[in-house]
Amino acid sequence: MERILLVEPEYKNKFPPLGLMKIATYHRNKGDIVEFCKGEASYTKIISSDRVYITTLFTFHYDITVKCILHYAKYLNRDSIFIGGIAATLMASDFKRDTGINNIIERQLFSSRTLGYEDNVNIDSLPLDYDILDDTFYRYPAGDNYFVHTTRGCPRGCEFCAVRILEPKFETTNNIVNQVRRVDKIYGKKRNLFVMDNNILCSPKLGEIIEDIRSLDFTGEANYIWPNQFEQMLGKIKRRKKFGMDYSKQLFDTIDLLEIFANRIKRYPKVRDELDEVINFIKKSDNIDEELETHSEFLSAVIEKYRSKTKMVRYVDFNQGIDARLINKRNIKMFSTIPIRPFRLACDRIEDTNKFNRATKLAIENNIRHLSNYILYNWKDKPEDLWIRLNNVVSLYSKNGTYIDGFSFPMKYAPINEKDRSYIGQYWNKKYLGAVNVIINVTNGVVAKERDFFIEAFGSNVEEFLEILSMPDELIRFRFFFKANGLIDYWKTLFRSLAEEEKTHLLDVLCKHKLNESIKTDEHPKRVKKMLVLYTINKSQFDRGERSYQSVVNEVESI
Amino acid sequence: MVDFTISFRLLETLTFALYEDPIVFFREYVQNSLDAYNAKVGNNEEKRLDDFYVDIKIDKDNKNIEIKDNGYGIEEDQEEDQFYKKMIDIGTSDKHNIKDQIGFRGIGRLSAMPLCKELVFENKPEGKDKCQIFKWYGEKFLNLLNKGEDINASIEQITEYYSEDYNGDIDDHYFKVTIRKYGVAIKGLFNKENHIKRLCTLLPLRYSPSFTVQEEIKGKYLDFMGGNLDKFECKVVLDGDELYKPYANEDILPSGIVFWNLKIPSDEEGARSEKIGILWFTFGHLIKKREKERPYGILVRSKNMLMGDEYSLAIDADRSSSEYITTLGELSQALNGVCGEMLIKYEDLNDNAKRDWFRIDDKSIKLRHIIVEFMRRLHEYRYAASDYVNKKLKDNTERRYIEALRNLKSSYDLDTLITDMKRLREETEASQESFFIANEDIPSESVTIKRFYERLIQCLYNYYEEKGEIFEFGKIRKYIKNYLKKEPKS
């Protein structure tokens, strides 16, 4: 029996580490003790482990990932550490060089022999172990769902996409029904289904897949009721005991769950008092574990009777997007038979707009109302292309009024072998990229379909968009505040009075690494110098009363 | 016969400079006694004594100190006078070849020499009717040192060697060090009230019998290291009373005893991963400075011999060039609130000449990694616990607290601690409710600052109320509140 520690570095991410969840299943089937840690585990945990598996994700998390790996390498023999996942596949030699670890697992784990075991198990096809996610306090926004693959790879091989390296061969893989049923059996029914295929439309079995999904009760009807959480917790505790895992946190969480539930049933004071009494008794006992089990029948019955049983629709999310170029009347009909939310398309290049529009219209015609799209920028495109594509989406979506629930998701391109996000595309510059980031950060990275919002944020035409991108980031970030106090209009007046070469000079300064230093020390044309005052503004200065509209104007005029 | 081959200046370095704190000579002599005894017993269990001990007698009136063990002394062999040979061999030791020996330099025996008029070694092996005596005249040594004389020419003046008839039982055996007419440095030691406490910390003593949790510590040590801690413990009697390590059951704080197994990883050259010892410690819900008389900090003991002091972990972590946790001051404060020992036994870790830490090499650097990790976890816990109890406005304080607790105490029994902590938090919240004004004006400040603020504002209120200018009070309160907001936090 080995002690296995699974690690994901401490970056924020939406999805749980699926690879590690499969490795967990493999080791648990072997009878090993498995534990998961997000970030740097404590020393005691590390030295008591026989093996550590560390996953990697985006290459721009390179530094934080290497730091995490080195933390483990300080206390454990490097031969006992295995690194895998996306970034490790894309930059294997960099990881080897910077961590001194030779066990780099590239691509999928098709055989346990890669890990040095003789049993030759296809780990990639194993079910996910959701229990490991309870070992950490980090909550994955999309953690409690089904995750399935029906195909691997993508025949397109787009230049900007890492799939051609990660999964070079396109092939059909698992049976979706079996994958979901296995999860149901062990962990209970989950609500939503994430299909992680890179290009499902290339699958020759699309019809079968959709039928399978429907057969799993993803029909668009409200037919899902959250399982009894108390029973789920008891199940978790039981499994953790069985696998020799620490379950103190789960005991603690169960008590919390019961207390919250007791507070919720105020309308039934008698039941509530009885529940309170049992909870207090359990809390005070020396053996919470045993007492929970003794009272489980009563607690479970009370919770079952009084818990919410609202029925909900279960959704399917083809998370990696659907290839708009391959949408046709036949396959869109199939998609329309399942509740997809959102229906993700992509408009990566302005040349794809017509195909994208056609696919979107087909989706809307077929009553698919939750839409979204990925819009790649900072690649071979120009800044104006971004506005044109976003504007096109807003027009498409808003034509259908409130019926459509949709958003765009601009995705900044970074080469797949870059270790940070500083890449600047041929037609872009640092200031523009920063400004786009500020604009979309206000809405958590998405662009909503409402036209008034779009015009406010991105401008009503390409010229206005480029003007907004030149604006001080602080003015973009707190647009309403600075609009109200008149500084945005003031900035516009100054900006529009600049000659073209002055605008170019201004942009050059704004793209400099050390902006504040350059403003103070470098030589600038007088009108540019005046403008630059507005780039030193910080809203907190206004909050503290250190600056006001008038003081800024005076400062500018004094130059 | 072996000649001295060292200069006075080197002798000065070996004695004065290496042992800056005079109290350490007690450690050197007790260690020599224990080493000599353990070497003799070795695998020959028949030689094990029922009651081996070191007896220290301090005669403050005559300024004499006697350190005598009932071990086997230095036994003669047929060819050489081993006792004499050892006495004049300075800076060589045969201990480094013997497993489980603590000292290895052969300089410790002179540590008291510059501190007294005469340093006398008396050797009585079993079965002999004579005892051998070797004297160092410390005062004369200092005089010659000041004159810059050559030691080889003057050695006769500062040493004396002779034998005396022994009047007791021929089977008696002992080794005795007598420090005669000690000087002001040693006298100064005894002027301080805490010299016994310092000896209890410094010497490789046994745990007090009333410290019952020692069984758990020794059990964990045995489980992990596969050897007994007992053989590095020495019974030491000072003026008739046995000295013990300073721990009592009441020193075990709410966390209970937490154990970390210490292991250094294998390296690229193929050296295997090795167990080097255990760390045991205990801490409270909040990491607060312990009461003055109670033990605190983590004492690092190599084969039970103290290395450095209570703050050694903080100092070592602070030396790390690769990782910065916080200031040395804060690290030390964190150690004020814990109590425990790092019990190390690892032949490849050599102590430095001053015996206050390990010699810097790749092994001690690996140990430093562990120490840095411990200090980081302790520091994180200190802040997470304090934030959880005191600063209810911060996000995720509970999650941070539990995570920090789990990182420090990787065990299964956290429930009681967390429940207690929740209660403590509620109590603190209740006590904070008395801060009517501070909670409103400076809600995220610490309790200490709030308490002061509350008093200050109350005082101002009384003043303005008496003057009948309560409107002015409002103005000054607003002014102070705004001023504090702008004030950058240190």
Image (cartoon, grey):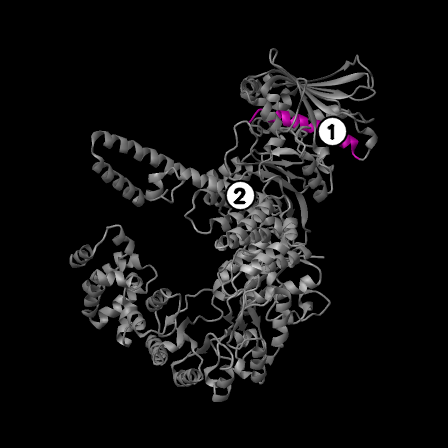
SS type, badge 1: helix
> Disc 2 residue type?
Leu
C-alpha separation, residue under disc 2 versus residue under disc 1: 39 Å
Q: Is residue A50 above or below residue A415?
A: above
Residue density around tag 1, few if under 14, some if 14–19, many if 20 or more, within 10 Å: many
Please report the bounds of the magenta region as a residue range.
B21-42
Q: Are marks 2 and 1 on the same chain?
A: yes
Task: Give me the residue at 56% from left, 83% from top.
Answer: A206
Residue at image mark 1: B36
The quadrant holding residue A484 is bottom left
Q: Name the residue type under label 1.
A: Ala
The subunit letter for the residue under badge 2 reads: B
Query: Taking B476 as reference, is B107 left or right?
Result: right
Residue located beneath label 2 in the image: B378
Q: How many marks?
A: 2
Q: Residue A44: image x %, image y %? A: 62, 48
Q: Residue furthest bottom?
A: A329
Q: Secondary structure at mark 2?
A: helix
Q: Residue at x 60, y 66 (%)?
A: A188
Residue B199: numbered disc: none
Q: Quadrant of residue B104?
A: top right
Question: Could you say where residue A46 lies in the image, as x and y percent from the top left?
Answer: 62, 52
Q: Earlier in the sequence, mark 2 or mark 1?
A: 1
Quarter of the image with the C terminus of chain A in it: bottom left
Q: Is residue B320 visible?
A: yes
> How far from the left and from the top, in percent, is residue B265?
64, 51
Q: Main secondary structure of the magenta part?
A: helix
In the displayed structure, A3 sits above or below A460; it is: above
- Please give the chain letter of the residue carrying mark 1: B
- Residue A434 covered by magenta stretch: no
Q: Does residue A8 show up?
A: no
- The extreme top residue here reads B61
